[in-house]
């Protein structure tokens, strides 16, 4: 299995979600106050002077819109904010809704406590160099790196982790260091840095990483791809992580369930969607009703393709369930199980979206999609930026799923099935038709939709010809290269 993960405690990524919530116009006032209180408590408890300045400084704090404090300053435009600030806050922020309070006395107090702690680390490093070996010196430097990650100083944390990495020879520790660097990038919204270090971690894992770190990296990759809107690549990684998830420093298990279902819903083909999302035991145990949960826990969900095809309940009339917390059954009794209880999550909209899409109950599907947008897409920092795209792609998926079964569909009948007006359906379909996303035409005179199914045989023939031309071109280039090398030898 390998050694237990190191450097996994900081930074606390839930604080990044709280920072996002403070600037999110979709968040309720009570939720903002809760996030503000949690953030202020964390800054005081962990002595996070650098993060406090980064967020609330009157001149350049990313959360200070009006220039609070002793000096009045003009608000700093998003383009001039510190690097990554745009990814930490909601981009469509309503102006003048929030200011993070700045306290000079508190900042100076936290800064002084940071300096005292750094002096302790410096003394520990010097003692280790004089009286102990290289292992103890590396341990002392690792504490300094974790300190910078804890207090929220991005640049110094990265530099410290890199310094420890350069002097470390153990592969497992190197992987843990790179994963810590990735989390710092995620915290501050540095996607380029995250991508670079995800690739770096993949190389290290492929060179001999243990099973646990391979699985942890899978969740890191999936989350990174989710933030870059690569849902097709993210879905298999996130879904595979459900049964082996231990990366609680990255996100909660409840969040992983949400990300997995959403990524699978928008990207997987119907057959894969059935096996990997609808019938997946880990998802049925959380999103299913009482019988589904029982069958998932007992293993009945994996009995065959017909398992779990119970009659679907209308999402619009279903009684809302009490919010519950997702539990990773594979982690029970494990030393890597989370120590803190997760906040309750109401999965009812997500369950309705999954079931209504697969069962073809399109009116319920649209209602569930609206509820998912309100409760999940608009509230999560990783999903918020892509919510418009996700809703549009899910509408397209619903239209495609219905139209592929018919040659001709009545415009009014289809509008009724989706619970929308004929005018809305006409306008919405027209956008997808113009972009060649749906092969059909709308006849408003006869009030019908005609699908234009592609000729598969002609398409296959054209693909073969195209690929053959490409192969011939490559062979010709190869032949020329061989002749040139032969003449050189002559």
Image (tube, rainbow, N blue to C red):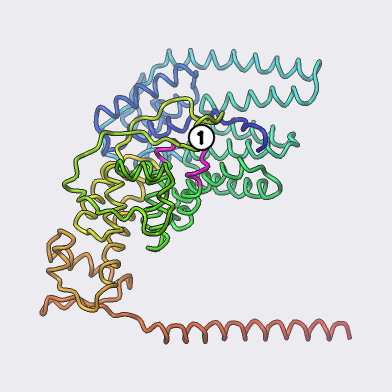
In the picture, residue 97 is in which quadrant? top left
Q: Nearer the viewer, residue 357 or 216?
A: 357
Reply above or below: 360 against 482: above
The secondary structure that dominates the magenta segment is loop
Reply above or below: 32 against 401: above
Quarter of the rendering occupied by the C terminus:
bottom right
Reply above or below: 233 against 443: above
Q: Where is residue 300 drawn, in percent x and y? A: 41, 49
Q: Where is residue 26 drawn, in percent x and y? A: 26, 39
Q: Where is residue 44 drawn, in percent x and y? A: 44, 17
Look at the image and tell me whether residue 216 can be seen: yes
At horizontal 54% and vertical 33% (from top left) the residue drawn is 154
In the picture, residue 158 is in which quadrant? top right
Over which residues does the magenta segment extend?
Answer: 241-255
Q: Where is residue 77 drawn, in percent x and y? A: 37, 40
User: Which residue is denoted by mark 1 in the rendering?
Assistant: 331
Q: Is residue 14 magenta?
A: no
Quarter of the rendering occupied by the N terminus:
top right
Label 1, secondary structure: give it. helix
**Left or right: 58 in relation to 411:** right
At horizontal 74% and vertical 34% (from top left) the residue drawn is 167
Q: Nearer the viewer, residue 356 or 480?
A: 356
Q: Nearer the viewer, residue 461 or 435?
A: 461
Q: Is residue 246 magenta?
A: yes
Look at the image and tell me whether residue 92 can be seen: no
**Left or right: 21 in relation to 119:** left
């Amino acid at each position: 299995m390998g050694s237990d993960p190191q450097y996994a405690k900081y930074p606390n990524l839930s604080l990044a979600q709280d920072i996002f919530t403070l600037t999110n116009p979709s968040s309720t006032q009570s939720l903002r106050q809760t996030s503000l209180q949690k953030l202020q408590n964390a800054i005081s408890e962990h002595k996070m002077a650098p993060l406090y300045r980064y967020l609330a400084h009157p001149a350049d704090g990313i959360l200070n819109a009006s220039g609070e404090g002793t000096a009045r300053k003009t608000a700093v435009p998003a383009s001039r904010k510190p690097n990554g600030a745009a990814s930490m806050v909601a981009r469509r922020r309503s102006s003048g809704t929030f200011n993070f309070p700045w306290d000079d006395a508190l900042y100076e107090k936290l800064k002084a406590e940071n300096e005292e702690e750094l002096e302790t680390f410096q003394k520990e490093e010097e003692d280790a160099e004089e009286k102990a070996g290289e292992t103890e010196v590396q341990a002392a430097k690792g504490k300094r790196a974790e300190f910078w990650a804890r207090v929220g100083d991005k640049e110094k944390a990265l530099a410290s982790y890199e310094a420890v990495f350069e002097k470390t020879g153990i592969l497992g520790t190197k992987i843990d260091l790179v994963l810590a660097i990735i989390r710092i990038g995620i915290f501050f919204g540095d996607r380029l840095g995250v991508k670079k270090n995800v690739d770096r971690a993949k190389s290290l894992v492929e060179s001999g990483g243990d099973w646990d770190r391979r699985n942890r990296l899978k969740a890191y990759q999936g989350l990174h791809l989710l933030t870059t809107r690569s849902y097709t690549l993210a879905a298999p990684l996130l879904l595979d992580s459900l049964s082996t998830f231990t990366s609680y420093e990255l996100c909660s298990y409840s969040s992983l369930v949400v990300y997995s279902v959403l990524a699978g819903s928008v990207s997987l083909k119907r057959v894969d969607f059935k096996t990997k999302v609808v019938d997946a035991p880990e998802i049925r145990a959380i999103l299913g009703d009482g019988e589904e949960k029982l069958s998932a826990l007992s293993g009945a969900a994996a009995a065959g393709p017909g398992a779990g095809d119970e009659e679907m309940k209308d999402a619009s009339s279903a009684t809302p369930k009490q919010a519950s917390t997702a539990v990773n059954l594979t982690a029970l009794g494990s030393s890597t199980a989370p120590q803190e209880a997760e906040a309750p999550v109401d999965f009812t909209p997500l369950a309705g979206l999954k079931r209504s899409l697969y069962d073809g109950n399109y009116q319920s599907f649209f209602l569930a999609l609206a509820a998912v947008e309100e409760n999940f897409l608009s509230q999560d920092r990783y999903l918020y930026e892509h919510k418009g795209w996700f809703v549009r792609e899910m509408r397209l998926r619903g239209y495609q799923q219905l139209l592929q079964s018919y040659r001709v569909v009545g415009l009014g009948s289809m509008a009724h099935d989706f619970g929308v007006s004929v005018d809305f359906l006409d306008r919405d379909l027209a956008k997808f038709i113009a972009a060649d996303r749906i092969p059909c035409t709308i006849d408003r005179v006869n009030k019908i939709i005609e699908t234009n199914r592609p000729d598969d045989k002609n398409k296959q023939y054209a693909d073969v010809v195209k690929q053959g031309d490409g192969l011939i071109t490559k062979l010709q280039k190869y032949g020329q290269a061989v002749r040139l090398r032969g003449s050189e030898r002559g």
